[in-house]
Image (spheres, rainbow, N blue to C red):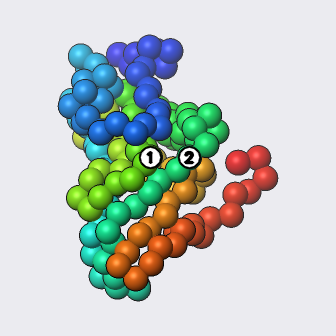
Amino acid sequence: MQPSTFNLPTIFSITESEIDLNDLLAKITLTSTGAAAIFTGMVRGVTSRDNPHETEFLEYEAYIPMAEEKMKQVADEIRERWPVIEGIAVVQRIGKLYPKTPTVLIACTAAHRDTGVFDAARYGIDRLKEIVPVWKKEVSPTGEFWVEGDYTPKPGE
């Protein structure tokens, strides 16, 4: 029996605090949950593709009210595409973050692993990168620059 969507746990937040995977997973897990797909993005200290370089740290900024509203939109889109998803967590860190630090987490739970839970989590991170207003400045030994995305929002997004 699928729980009512009104009772399904959904977390979306911008935070300066460390991302606590165990706490988030506990909050989006139901007694019917048998699978969780989790994506965590990290700060790389060394980038080897495209423009190879070292990174000392990243600085993330966000307009929190708008970013959290867009995160809610991402969660709503996941629920629309994958109605079997039980819990969803979308969390983005801001502030000064050093290599090997988790910066973003998308987690989706479902009753079984073959219900689209992997696809839902992948969609979540891809969509977050597209529409959530979070800005990233990269600081390296050779200077600093704002990292530009390549997505242009469509009207209404």
Question: In 3D space, how far apart are the residues under numbered discs 1 and 2 (Cα atoms)?
Answer: 7 Å
Q: Would residue 81 be seen by someone viewing this image from the given angle?
A: yes
Nearer to me, 17 or 141: 141
Toward which corner of the image does residue 22 lie, by quadrant? top left
Nearer to me, 18 or 48: 18
In percent of width and height, residue 83 lies at 47, 32
In percent of width and height, residue 23 lies at 25, 27
Q: Would residue 116 be seen by someone viewing this image from the given angle?
A: no
Amino acid type at circle 1 is Ile
Nearer to me, 84 or 49: 49
In the rendered structure, are the residues bearing label 1 and label 2 in contact, judged by CB atoms less than 8 Å apart? yes
Residue drawn at point x = 27 percent, y = 70 percent: 45
* SS state under label 2: strand
* SS state under label 1: loop
Task: For label 1, count other residues whose C-alpha is less than 10 Å away and answer few (under 14), some (14-19) or many (20+).
Answer: many
Q: Which residue is under mark 2?
A: 62
Q: Which residue is under mark 1?
A: 94
